[in-house]
Amino acid sequence: MAEKLIIFDTTLRDGEQSPGASMTRDEKLRIARQLERLKVDVIEAGFAASSQGDFEAVKAIADAIKDSTVCSLSRANDRDISKAAEALKGANSARIHTFIATSALHMEKKLRMTPDQVFEQAVQSVRFAKNLVGDIEFSPEDGFRSDMDFLCRILEAVIREGATTINVPDTVGYAIPELYGDFIKTLRTRIPNSDKAIWSVHCHNDLGMAVANSLAGIKIGGARQIECTINGLGERAGNCALEEVVMAIKTRSDYFGLTVGIDTQQILAASRMVSQTTGFVVQPNKAVVGANAFAHASGIHQDGVLKARDTYEIMRAQDIGWSNNKIVLGKLSGRNAFKQRLQELGVDLQSEAEINGAFAKFKELADRKSDIFDEDILALVSEESHSNDKDTFNFVSLSQRSETGERPHASIVFNVNGTEVHSESDGNGPVDASLKAIEKHVQSGAEMVLYSVNAISGSTESQGEVTVRLQNSGRIVNGVGSDPDIVVASAKAYLSALNKIRSQAERVMAQG
Ligand code: KIV
Ligand code: ZN
Protein backbone atom coordinates (compact mmCIF):
# COMPACT_ATOMS: atom_id res chain seq x y z
CA MET A 1 0.00 0.00 0.00
CA ALA A 2 1.24 3.49 -0.87
CA GLU A 3 2.20 5.64 2.12
CA LYS A 4 -0.06 8.55 3.01
CA LEU A 5 1.10 12.15 2.75
CA ILE A 6 -0.36 14.44 5.42
CA ILE A 7 -1.87 17.66 4.05
CA PHE A 8 -1.57 20.49 6.58
CA ASP A 9 -3.46 23.57 5.48
CA THR A 10 -2.36 26.93 6.87
CA THR A 11 -4.60 29.26 4.81
CA LEU A 12 -6.18 30.54 8.02
CA ARG A 13 -2.84 31.25 9.71
CA ASP A 14 0.11 31.79 7.35
CA GLY A 15 -2.24 32.66 4.47
CA GLU A 16 -4.04 35.20 6.57
CA GLN A 17 -0.74 36.93 7.40
CA SER A 18 -0.72 38.29 3.88
CA PRO A 19 -1.42 42.04 4.17
CA GLY A 20 -5.09 42.63 3.46
CA ALA A 21 -6.11 38.97 3.79
CA SER A 22 -7.38 39.17 7.35
CA MET A 23 -10.69 37.41 7.89
CA THR A 24 -13.43 37.58 10.46
CA ARG A 25 -14.21 34.69 12.80
CA ASP A 26 -17.26 33.73 10.70
CA GLU A 27 -15.33 33.86 7.44
CA LYS A 28 -12.65 31.64 8.94
CA LEU A 29 -15.23 29.19 10.22
CA ARG A 30 -16.79 28.96 6.76
CA ILE A 31 -13.42 28.30 5.16
CA ALA A 32 -12.56 25.74 7.87
CA ARG A 33 -15.77 23.86 7.05
CA GLN A 34 -14.78 23.83 3.38
CA LEU A 35 -11.31 22.56 4.33
CA GLU A 36 -12.98 19.77 6.26
CA ARG A 37 -15.08 18.88 3.19
CA LEU A 38 -11.84 18.94 1.21
CA LYS A 39 -10.60 16.40 3.79
CA VAL A 40 -7.37 18.13 4.73
CA ASP A 41 -5.68 16.25 7.56
CA VAL A 42 -4.73 19.27 9.65
CA ILE A 43 -6.24 22.78 9.69
CA GLU A 44 -3.97 25.43 11.20
CA ALA A 45 -6.80 27.64 12.40
CA GLY A 46 -4.76 30.62 13.60
CA PHE A 47 -2.40 31.90 16.24
CA ALA A 48 -4.55 31.90 19.38
CA ALA A 49 -2.33 34.16 21.50
CA SER A 50 -1.99 36.88 18.86
CA SER A 51 -5.32 38.59 19.57
CA GLN A 52 -8.71 37.99 21.18
CA GLY A 53 -10.18 37.69 17.66
CA ASP A 54 -7.71 34.96 16.71
CA PHE A 55 -8.35 33.14 19.98
CA GLU A 56 -12.09 33.15 19.30
CA ALA A 57 -11.63 32.00 15.70
CA VAL A 58 -9.39 29.08 16.72
CA LYS A 59 -11.86 28.14 19.46
CA ALA A 60 -14.89 28.30 17.12
CA ILE A 61 -13.09 26.12 14.56
CA ALA A 62 -11.92 23.65 17.22
CA ASP A 63 -15.50 23.35 18.50
CA ALA A 64 -17.04 22.90 15.03
CA ILE A 65 -14.62 20.70 13.08
CA LYS A 66 -14.93 16.98 13.60
CA ASP A 67 -12.89 15.22 10.92
CA SER A 68 -9.65 17.21 10.62
CA THR A 69 -7.08 17.86 13.34
CA VAL A 70 -7.28 21.52 14.44
CA CYS A 71 -3.99 23.25 15.18
CA SER A 72 -2.97 26.57 16.70
CA LEU A 73 0.39 28.23 16.18
CA SER A 74 2.18 29.50 19.27
CA ARG A 75 5.54 31.08 19.98
CA ALA A 76 7.79 29.03 22.22
CA ASN A 77 6.62 30.44 25.55
CA ASP A 78 4.25 29.22 28.26
CA ARG A 79 1.69 32.01 27.80
CA ASP A 80 1.23 31.42 24.07
CA ILE A 81 1.14 27.67 24.50
CA SER A 82 -1.48 27.87 27.31
CA LYS A 83 -3.67 30.13 25.14
CA ALA A 84 -3.39 27.70 22.23
CA ALA A 85 -4.33 24.75 24.46
CA GLU A 86 -7.28 26.66 25.90
CA ALA A 87 -8.61 27.59 22.44
CA LEU A 88 -8.24 23.98 21.29
CA LYS A 89 -10.05 22.41 24.27
CA GLY A 90 -13.19 21.54 22.27
CA ALA A 91 -11.35 19.85 19.39
CA ASN A 92 -11.83 16.17 18.56
CA SER A 93 -8.18 16.10 17.61
CA ALA A 94 -5.89 19.00 18.61
CA ARG A 95 -2.33 19.99 17.76
CA ILE A 96 -0.08 22.73 19.14
CA HIS A 97 2.49 24.06 16.69
CA THR A 98 5.24 25.90 18.50
CA PHE A 99 8.15 27.69 16.85
CA ILE A 100 11.30 29.66 17.53
CA ALA A 101 13.86 31.06 15.10
CA THR A 102 17.13 29.12 14.78
CA SER A 103 19.16 30.88 12.08
CA ALA A 104 22.12 32.94 13.32
CA LEU A 105 20.61 36.02 11.70
CA HIS A 106 17.21 35.68 13.37
CA MET A 107 18.61 34.67 16.77
CA GLU A 108 21.00 37.59 16.89
CA LYS A 109 19.05 40.37 15.19
CA LYS A 110 15.42 39.50 15.92
CA LEU A 111 15.37 37.50 19.14
CA ARG A 112 18.61 38.91 20.60
CA MET A 113 19.24 35.51 22.14
CA THR A 114 22.23 33.18 22.14
CA PRO A 115 21.92 29.74 20.53
CA ASP A 116 22.01 28.15 24.01
CA GLN A 117 19.10 30.33 25.17
CA VAL A 118 17.10 29.40 22.05
CA PHE A 119 17.90 25.73 22.67
CA GLU A 120 16.68 25.94 26.28
CA GLN A 121 13.50 27.80 25.34
CA ALA A 122 12.63 25.30 22.59
CA VAL A 123 13.13 22.32 24.86
CA GLN A 124 11.18 23.82 27.78
CA SER A 125 8.32 24.89 25.50
CA VAL A 126 7.88 21.47 23.95
CA ARG A 127 8.01 19.93 27.45
CA PHE A 128 5.36 22.39 28.67
CA ALA A 129 3.13 21.85 25.59
CA LYS A 130 3.39 18.07 25.84
CA ASN A 131 1.70 18.21 29.25
CA LEU A 132 -1.31 19.91 27.66
CA VAL A 133 -1.74 18.22 24.25
CA GLY A 134 -0.28 14.97 22.90
CA ASP A 135 0.17 16.09 19.31
CA ILE A 136 3.03 18.64 19.17
CA GLU A 137 4.65 20.15 16.12
CA PHE A 138 7.89 22.07 16.38
CA SER A 139 9.27 24.48 13.76
CA PRO A 140 12.75 26.01 13.77
CA GLU A 141 11.85 29.28 12.03
CA ASP A 142 14.19 30.16 9.15
CA GLY A 143 15.25 26.52 9.45
CA PHE A 144 16.68 26.26 5.96
CA ARG A 145 19.16 29.08 6.68
CA SER A 146 20.14 27.63 10.06
CA ASP A 147 23.41 25.96 10.95
CA MET A 148 23.09 22.20 10.39
CA ASP A 149 24.91 21.18 13.60
CA PHE A 150 22.80 23.50 15.74
CA LEU A 151 19.61 22.35 14.03
CA CYS A 152 20.46 18.68 14.61
CA ARG A 153 21.11 19.39 18.29
CA ILE A 154 17.86 21.30 18.87
CA LEU A 155 15.64 18.96 16.82
CA GLU A 156 16.99 15.85 18.52
CA ALA A 157 16.22 17.46 21.88
CA VAL A 158 12.64 18.50 21.04
CA ILE A 159 11.87 15.04 19.66
CA ARG A 160 13.13 13.64 22.96
CA GLU A 161 10.69 15.97 24.76
CA GLY A 162 7.81 14.55 22.71
CA ALA A 163 7.47 16.62 19.52
CA THR A 164 5.60 14.37 17.10
CA THR A 165 6.07 16.45 13.94
CA ILE A 166 9.18 18.36 12.92
CA ASN A 167 8.53 21.05 10.36
CA VAL A 168 11.44 22.59 8.44
CA PRO A 169 10.45 26.07 7.21
CA ASP A 170 12.06 27.82 4.30
CA THR A 171 10.72 31.01 5.85
CA VAL A 172 12.06 33.43 3.26
CA GLY A 173 11.71 31.26 0.14
CA TYR A 174 15.47 30.94 -0.36
CA ALA A 175 15.66 27.21 -1.08
CA ILE A 176 16.31 25.38 -4.36
CA PRO A 177 14.55 22.00 -4.78
CA GLU A 178 17.60 19.70 -4.66
CA LEU A 179 19.20 21.62 -1.81
CA TYR A 180 16.03 21.63 0.27
CA GLY A 181 15.46 17.91 -0.37
CA ASP A 182 19.05 17.13 0.65
CA PHE A 183 18.76 19.37 3.71
CA ILE A 184 15.85 17.34 5.05
CA LYS A 185 17.53 14.07 4.14
CA THR A 186 20.66 15.12 6.06
CA LEU A 187 18.62 16.09 9.12
CA ARG A 188 16.79 12.77 9.07
CA THR A 189 20.03 10.84 8.63
CA ARG A 190 22.04 12.67 11.27
CA ILE A 191 19.44 12.94 14.04
CA PRO A 192 19.45 9.62 15.92
CA ASN A 193 15.78 9.74 16.99
CA SER A 194 14.47 11.23 13.70
CA ASP A 195 12.25 8.18 13.13
CA LYS A 196 10.18 9.15 16.21
CA ALA A 197 8.71 12.16 14.38
CA ILE A 198 6.95 12.88 11.12
CA TRP A 199 8.94 15.31 8.97
CA SER A 200 7.19 18.22 7.38
CA VAL A 201 7.94 20.78 4.67
CA HIS A 202 6.91 24.45 4.80
CA CYS A 203 8.03 26.52 1.82
CA HIS A 204 7.51 30.14 0.86
CA ASN A 205 7.31 31.19 -2.76
CA ASP A 206 9.68 34.17 -3.03
CA LEU A 207 11.58 32.60 -5.92
CA GLY A 208 8.51 30.83 -7.31
CA MET A 209 9.72 27.44 -6.10
CA ALA A 210 7.53 26.70 -3.07
CA VAL A 211 5.73 23.79 -4.74
CA ALA A 212 8.92 22.38 -6.33
CA ASN A 213 10.81 22.68 -3.04
CA SER A 214 8.01 21.00 -1.09
CA LEU A 215 7.89 18.11 -3.56
CA ALA A 216 11.67 17.72 -3.34
CA GLY A 217 11.38 17.67 0.46
CA ILE A 218 9.01 14.72 0.02
CA LYS A 219 10.84 12.86 -2.73
CA ILE A 220 14.48 13.42 -1.78
CA GLY A 221 14.12 14.25 1.91
CA GLY A 222 11.47 11.68 2.85
CA ALA A 223 9.14 14.19 4.55
CA ARG A 224 5.56 13.00 4.94
CA GLN A 225 3.68 16.23 5.67
CA ILE A 226 3.25 19.25 3.39
CA GLU A 227 2.22 22.65 4.73
CA CYS A 228 0.33 24.64 2.15
CA THR A 229 -2.44 27.16 1.53
CA ILE A 230 -5.36 27.43 -0.86
CA ASN A 231 -4.34 29.43 -3.97
CA GLY A 232 -0.85 29.71 -2.44
CA LEU A 233 -2.13 32.58 -0.29
CA GLY A 234 0.49 33.99 2.07
CA GLU A 235 2.85 36.81 2.89
CA ARG A 236 4.90 38.31 0.05
CA ALA A 237 4.83 35.79 -2.83
CA GLY A 238 2.81 33.35 -0.71
CA ASN A 239 3.10 29.76 0.44
CA CYS A 240 3.12 26.42 -1.34
CA ALA A 241 -0.26 26.07 -3.15
CA LEU A 242 -2.37 23.17 -1.88
CA GLU A 243 -4.13 22.58 -5.20
CA GLU A 244 -0.81 22.30 -7.04
CA VAL A 245 0.99 19.91 -4.69
CA VAL A 246 -2.07 17.73 -4.25
CA MET A 247 -2.67 17.42 -8.00
CA ALA A 248 1.05 16.82 -8.59
CA ILE A 249 1.10 13.97 -6.07
CA LYS A 250 -2.09 12.49 -7.57
CA THR A 251 -1.29 12.99 -11.26
CA ARG A 252 2.28 11.71 -10.86
CA SER A 253 1.57 8.95 -8.37
CA ASP A 254 3.75 6.80 -10.66
CA TYR A 255 6.71 8.97 -9.55
CA PHE A 256 5.86 9.93 -5.96
CA GLY A 257 4.23 6.63 -4.93
CA LEU A 258 2.16 8.37 -2.23
CA THR A 259 -1.54 8.87 -1.55
CA VAL A 260 -3.44 11.86 -0.18
CA GLY A 261 -6.82 11.82 1.55
CA ILE A 262 -8.02 14.98 -0.26
CA ASP A 263 -11.41 15.05 -1.99
CA THR A 264 -10.11 16.89 -5.04
CA GLN A 265 -13.60 17.72 -6.30
CA GLN A 266 -13.79 20.26 -3.48
CA ILE A 267 -10.65 22.12 -4.61
CA LEU A 268 -12.35 24.66 -6.86
CA ALA A 269 -15.00 25.58 -4.28
CA ALA A 270 -12.23 26.09 -1.72
CA SER A 271 -10.24 28.22 -4.14
CA ARG A 272 -13.22 30.44 -4.96
CA MET A 273 -14.21 30.78 -1.34
CA VAL A 274 -10.73 31.90 -0.30
CA SER A 275 -10.41 34.28 -3.23
CA GLN A 276 -13.82 35.86 -2.70
CA THR A 277 -13.35 36.13 1.05
CA THR A 278 -9.92 37.72 0.95
CA GLY A 279 -10.20 39.67 -2.32
CA PHE A 280 -7.04 37.98 -3.65
CA VAL A 281 -7.99 37.30 -7.25
CA VAL A 282 -6.79 34.05 -8.86
CA GLN A 283 -4.80 34.78 -12.03
CA PRO A 284 -6.39 33.19 -15.15
CA ASN A 285 -3.32 31.11 -15.97
CA LYS A 286 -2.90 29.79 -12.42
CA ALA A 287 -2.31 26.02 -12.41
CA VAL A 288 -5.33 23.85 -11.51
CA VAL A 289 -7.73 26.63 -10.38
CA GLY A 290 -7.16 29.47 -12.88
CA ALA A 291 -9.95 30.19 -15.37
CA ASN A 292 -7.70 29.08 -18.27
CA ALA A 293 -6.38 25.94 -16.59
CA PHE A 294 -8.71 23.73 -18.63
CA ALA A 295 -9.59 26.11 -21.48
CA HIS A 296 -8.21 24.89 -24.76
CA ALA A 297 -8.14 28.05 -26.79
CA SER A 298 -6.06 27.05 -29.78
CA GLY A 299 -7.88 25.18 -32.56
CA ILE A 300 -5.22 22.46 -32.71
CA HIS A 301 -5.58 21.73 -29.02
CA GLN A 302 -9.36 21.73 -29.16
CA ASP A 303 -9.32 19.25 -32.00
CA GLY A 304 -6.95 17.01 -30.09
CA VAL A 305 -9.00 17.17 -26.89
CA LEU A 306 -12.20 16.35 -28.75
CA LYS A 307 -10.60 13.30 -30.37
CA ALA A 308 -8.93 12.04 -27.21
CA ARG A 309 -8.91 14.00 -23.97
CA ASP A 310 -5.45 12.89 -22.87
CA THR A 311 -3.74 14.38 -25.95
CA TYR A 312 -3.53 17.69 -24.08
CA GLU A 313 -5.15 17.14 -20.66
CA ILE A 314 -3.25 15.45 -17.86
CA MET A 315 -6.02 15.98 -15.29
CA ARG A 316 -9.81 15.88 -15.57
CA ALA A 317 -11.51 19.22 -14.96
CA GLN A 318 -14.35 17.45 -13.13
CA ASP A 319 -11.89 15.95 -10.63
CA ILE A 320 -11.08 19.46 -9.41
CA GLY A 321 -14.71 20.53 -9.24
CA TRP A 322 -15.08 22.35 -12.56
CA SER A 323 -18.65 21.63 -13.54
CA ASN A 324 -19.55 21.24 -17.21
CA ASN A 325 -23.02 22.62 -16.89
CA LYS A 326 -22.44 26.11 -15.56
CA ILE A 327 -25.83 27.77 -16.11
CA VAL A 328 -27.66 26.64 -13.07
CA LEU A 329 -30.53 28.84 -12.03
CA GLY A 330 -32.72 31.68 -13.25
CA LYS A 331 -35.59 33.96 -12.33
CA LEU A 332 -38.10 31.13 -11.95
CA SER A 333 -35.96 28.93 -9.74
CA GLY A 334 -37.45 28.37 -6.32
CA ARG A 335 -35.99 28.27 -2.83
CA ASN A 336 -35.56 24.48 -2.91
CA ALA A 337 -33.59 24.53 -6.16
CA PHE A 338 -31.44 27.32 -4.72
CA LYS A 339 -30.87 25.41 -1.49
CA GLN A 340 -29.97 22.24 -3.38
CA ARG A 341 -27.48 24.08 -5.59
CA LEU A 342 -25.88 25.55 -2.46
CA GLN A 343 -25.46 22.04 -1.12
CA GLU A 344 -23.99 20.81 -4.41
CA LEU A 345 -21.51 23.68 -4.28
CA GLY A 346 -20.56 22.63 -0.78
CA VAL A 347 -21.93 25.83 0.77
CA ASP A 348 -23.30 25.01 4.10
CA LEU A 349 -25.37 27.96 5.37
CA GLN A 350 -26.03 27.33 8.99
CA SER A 351 -29.46 28.77 9.71
CA GLU A 352 -32.76 29.18 7.88
CA ALA A 353 -32.33 32.95 8.33
CA GLU A 354 -29.01 32.80 6.41
CA ILE A 355 -30.60 30.76 3.61
CA ASN A 356 -33.53 33.20 3.42
CA GLY A 357 -31.14 36.18 3.29
CA ALA A 358 -29.11 34.60 0.49
CA PHE A 359 -32.27 33.55 -1.39
CA ALA A 360 -33.66 37.11 -1.25
CA LYS A 361 -30.38 38.38 -2.73
CA PHE A 362 -30.52 35.65 -5.38
CA LYS A 363 -34.05 36.74 -6.41
CA GLU A 364 -32.92 40.36 -6.63
CA LEU A 365 -30.01 39.32 -8.84
CA ALA A 366 -32.17 37.04 -11.01
CA ASP A 367 -34.44 40.01 -11.74
CA ARG A 368 -31.47 41.81 -13.26
CA LYS A 369 -29.54 38.95 -14.84
CA SER A 370 -31.13 36.08 -16.77
CA ASP A 371 -28.57 33.31 -16.19
CA ILE A 372 -27.20 32.76 -12.74
CA PHE A 373 -23.91 30.86 -12.73
CA ASP A 374 -22.25 28.96 -9.89
CA GLU A 375 -19.81 31.84 -9.55
CA ASP A 376 -22.71 34.26 -9.00
CA ILE A 377 -24.11 32.10 -6.25
CA LEU A 378 -20.75 31.81 -4.53
CA ALA A 379 -20.20 35.59 -4.75
CA LEU A 380 -23.61 36.27 -3.35
CA VAL A 381 -23.16 33.87 -0.44
CA SER A 382 -19.75 35.28 0.21
CA GLU A 383 -21.15 38.83 0.31
CA GLU A 384 -23.89 37.66 2.65
CA SER A 385 -21.30 36.22 5.00
CA HIS A 386 -19.03 39.31 4.84
CA SER A 387 -21.74 41.57 6.10
CA ASN A 388 -22.70 41.29 9.72
CA ASP A 389 -24.85 43.14 12.22
CA LYS A 390 -21.80 44.88 13.66
CA ASP A 391 -20.90 46.54 10.34
CA THR A 392 -20.67 50.32 10.58
CA PHE A 393 -21.27 51.02 6.87
CA ASN A 394 -23.86 49.46 4.59
CA PHE A 395 -24.61 50.25 0.97
CA VAL A 396 -28.16 51.45 0.15
CA SER A 397 -28.27 52.97 -3.35
CA LEU A 398 -26.28 54.90 -5.90
CA SER A 399 -26.85 57.01 -8.97
CA GLN A 400 -24.18 58.41 -11.21
CA ARG A 401 -23.98 60.47 -14.37
CA SER A 402 -21.24 60.25 -16.95
CA GLU A 403 -21.12 61.59 -20.45
CA THR A 404 -18.31 62.14 -22.94
CA GLY A 405 -16.80 65.55 -22.30
CA GLU A 406 -18.53 65.98 -18.91
CA ARG A 407 -17.00 65.40 -15.48
CA PRO A 408 -18.71 62.32 -13.91
CA HIS A 409 -20.83 62.85 -10.82
CA ALA A 410 -22.07 60.33 -8.24
CA SER A 411 -24.69 60.51 -5.55
CA ILE A 412 -24.69 57.73 -2.96
CA VAL A 413 -26.87 56.70 -0.04
CA PHE A 414 -25.43 54.43 2.65
CA ASN A 415 -26.03 53.52 6.28
CA VAL A 416 -23.66 54.59 9.03
CA ASN A 417 -24.49 52.71 12.23
CA GLY A 418 -28.10 52.42 11.08
CA THR A 419 -28.53 56.06 10.05
CA GLU A 420 -28.96 56.81 6.37
CA VAL A 421 -26.57 59.39 4.91
CA HIS A 422 -26.38 60.94 1.49
CA SER A 423 -23.21 62.20 -0.14
CA GLU A 424 -22.20 63.47 -3.59
CA SER A 425 -18.99 64.08 -5.46
CA ASP A 426 -17.39 64.56 -8.85
CA GLY A 427 -14.53 62.36 -9.96
CA ASN A 428 -12.31 61.33 -12.85
CA GLY A 429 -14.72 58.53 -13.66
CA PRO A 430 -17.97 57.17 -12.17
CA VAL A 431 -16.10 54.80 -9.82
CA ASP A 432 -13.78 57.57 -8.65
CA ALA A 433 -16.75 59.90 -8.10
CA SER A 434 -18.63 57.25 -6.06
CA LEU A 435 -15.70 56.42 -3.80
CA LYS A 436 -14.92 60.11 -3.34
CA ALA A 437 -18.55 60.66 -2.31
CA ILE A 438 -18.20 57.97 0.38
CA GLU A 439 -14.85 59.32 1.54
CA LYS A 440 -16.23 62.88 1.67
CA HIS A 441 -18.60 61.77 4.41
CA VAL A 442 -16.49 59.14 6.20
CA GLN A 443 -13.12 60.96 6.07
CA SER A 444 -11.19 57.78 6.84
CA GLY A 445 -7.99 59.23 5.40
CA ALA A 446 -7.15 55.72 4.13
CA GLU A 447 -4.90 55.40 1.11
CA MET A 448 -6.04 53.13 -1.72
CA VAL A 449 -3.23 50.76 -2.64
CA LEU A 450 -5.11 48.45 -5.02
CA TYR A 451 -8.30 48.52 -7.05
CA SER A 452 -9.21 45.59 -9.29
CA VAL A 453 -12.29 44.48 -11.22
CA ASN A 454 -12.94 40.96 -12.35
CA ALA A 455 -15.88 39.62 -14.39
CA ILE A 456 -17.16 36.78 -12.23
CA SER A 457 -18.35 34.58 -15.08
CA GLY A 458 -16.35 35.92 -17.96
CA SER A 459 -18.71 38.03 -20.10
CA THR A 460 -20.01 41.61 -19.96
CA GLU A 461 -23.34 40.22 -18.71
CA SER A 462 -21.50 38.92 -15.73
CA GLN A 463 -21.38 40.44 -12.26
CA GLY A 464 -18.30 42.52 -11.60
CA GLU A 465 -16.30 41.55 -8.54
CA VAL A 466 -14.25 44.41 -7.18
CA THR A 467 -11.41 44.33 -4.68
CA VAL A 468 -10.34 47.51 -2.92
CA ARG A 469 -7.22 47.46 -0.75
CA LEU A 470 -6.86 50.30 1.75
CA GLN A 471 -3.95 51.24 3.95
CA ASN A 472 -4.53 53.15 7.13
CA SER A 473 -2.14 53.77 10.04
CA GLY A 474 0.14 50.95 8.90
CA ARG A 475 -2.70 48.43 8.51
CA ILE A 476 -3.85 46.99 5.20
CA VAL A 477 -7.34 45.62 4.54
CA ASN A 478 -9.13 44.25 1.47
CA GLY A 479 -12.80 44.89 0.75
CA VAL A 480 -14.75 42.87 -1.80
CA GLY A 481 -18.05 43.76 -3.50
CA SER A 482 -20.00 42.25 -6.36
CA ASP A 483 -22.84 43.52 -8.51
CA PRO A 484 -23.78 43.52 -12.21
CA ASP A 485 -23.07 47.28 -12.05
CA ILE A 486 -19.34 47.68 -11.43
CA VAL A 487 -19.78 51.16 -9.95
CA VAL A 488 -22.10 49.68 -7.31
CA ALA A 489 -19.69 46.75 -6.82
CA SER A 490 -16.89 49.29 -6.27
CA ALA A 491 -18.89 51.23 -3.69
CA LYS A 492 -19.74 48.01 -1.84
CA ALA A 493 -16.08 46.95 -1.89
CA TYR A 494 -14.99 50.33 -0.53
CA LEU A 495 -17.57 50.22 2.28
CA SER A 496 -16.53 46.65 3.10
CA ALA A 497 -12.89 47.75 3.37
CA LEU A 498 -13.90 50.64 5.65
CA ASN A 499 -15.80 48.17 7.87
CA LYS A 500 -12.65 46.07 8.14
CA ILE A 501 -10.54 49.08 9.09
CA ARG A 502 -13.00 49.83 11.88
CA SER A 503 -13.08 46.28 13.21
CA GLN A 504 -9.46 45.22 12.87
CA ALA A 505 -7.76 44.97 16.22
CA GLU A 506 -4.01 45.03 16.66
CA ARG A 507 -2.42 41.62 16.82
CA VAL A 508 0.92 39.91 16.93
CA MET A 509 2.18 38.31 13.73
CA ALA A 510 4.38 35.22 13.45
CA GLN A 511 7.64 35.75 11.54
CA GLY A 512 8.78 38.96 13.08
O1 KIV B 1 7.50 30.44 7.54
C1 KIV B 1 7.64 30.16 8.73
O2 KIV B 1 8.75 30.06 9.27
C2 KIV B 1 6.44 29.95 9.53
C3 KIV B 1 6.64 29.37 10.88
C4 KIV B 1 5.91 30.15 11.91
C5 KIV B 1 6.29 27.93 10.85
O3 KIV B 1 5.34 30.18 9.07
ZN1 ZN C 1 5.44 30.41 6.87
Image (tube, rainbow, N blue to C red):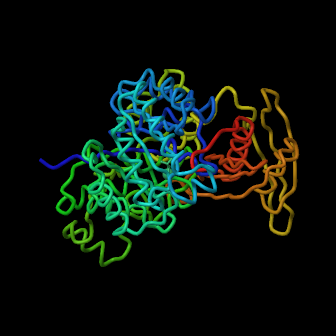
- Residue placed at 47% from the left, 39% from the top? 98
Front one among 388 and 331: 388
Quarter of image, res 419? top right
Q: How many marks?
A: 0
Whether residue 198 sits left or right of residue 507 in the image: it is: left
Q: Residue furthest bottom?
A: 300
- The picture places residue 487, in percent across and down from the top left corner, at 71, 52
- The picture places residue 60, in percent across and down from the top left corner, at 50, 26
Front one among 123 and 106: 123
Is residue 297 positioned above or below 339 on the image? below
- The picture places residue 21, in percent across and down from the top left corner, at 59, 47
Is residue 193 positioned above or below 250 on the image? above
Whether residue 226 sits left or right of residue 102 in the image: it is: left
- The picture places residue 338, in percent across and down from the top left corner, at 44, 33
Q: Is any part of residue 419 visible from this angle?
A: yes
Q: Residue furthest front?
A: 116
- Residue placed at 25% from the left, 69% from the top? 305
Q: Is any part of residue 370 visible from this angle?
A: no
Whether residue 226 sits left or right of residue 374 in the image: it is: left
Quarter of image, res 442? top right
